[in-house]
Amino acid sequence: MNRRLIRPTLSDVQDQLGSRMQRKKPAPPDQTNAENFYYLKQMQARTPMIVVLDQGETIRGVIEWYDKHCIKVHRTNEPNLLLMKSCIRFMYKDGESRGGAHQEGDNHQPQDAE
């Protein structure tokens, strides 16, 4: 009695692996559009905003428009400004408190902790 080893061909193995790869969950999108949604919401409501720059300077105004790299802030009784997003530390709605965090450093840790 002769026994034969039955091996799958290379194409059979590739077909099986290909079907397994298709079942994997797709990767999440690179961009969630949350930033765009936030800007549009503030622009439509003409919400007064406070923008804090890297140097610590604060700008008060309403976001007039934005693009990928910058925002335009409309200020009353002062010239409008075009701010590069890379120079913005953070922004928040005018009238919202900063939650008691100190202005210098913005690391939200007490000065005594070392």
Image: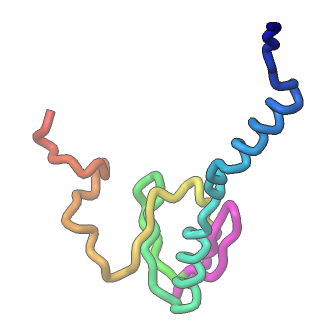
Asked if residue 45 lies left or right of residue 68, the reply is left
Does any portion of residue 78 appear in the rendered image? Answer: no
- The image position of residue 47, as x and y in percent, is 47, 87
Q: Is residue 79 above or below residue 56?
A: below
Does any portion of residue 47 appear in the rendered image? Answer: yes
**Residue 14 lies in quadrant:** top right
Residue under the image location 80 percent in, 7 percent down: 1
Asked if residue 18 lies left or right of residue 83, the reply is right
Residue under the image location 13 percent in, 38 percent down: 113
Single out the residue that lies furthest toward the bottom.
45
- The image position of residue 69, as x and y in percent, is 68, 60
Asked if residue 68 lies left or right of residue 40, the reply is right
Residue 81 lies in the magenta stretch: yes
Q: Is residue 79 or residue 98 the one in the foreground?
A: 98
Give the residues in magenta. Answer: 63-82
Residue under the image location 22 percent in, 57 percent down: 102
Q: Is residue 33 above or below residue 89?
A: below
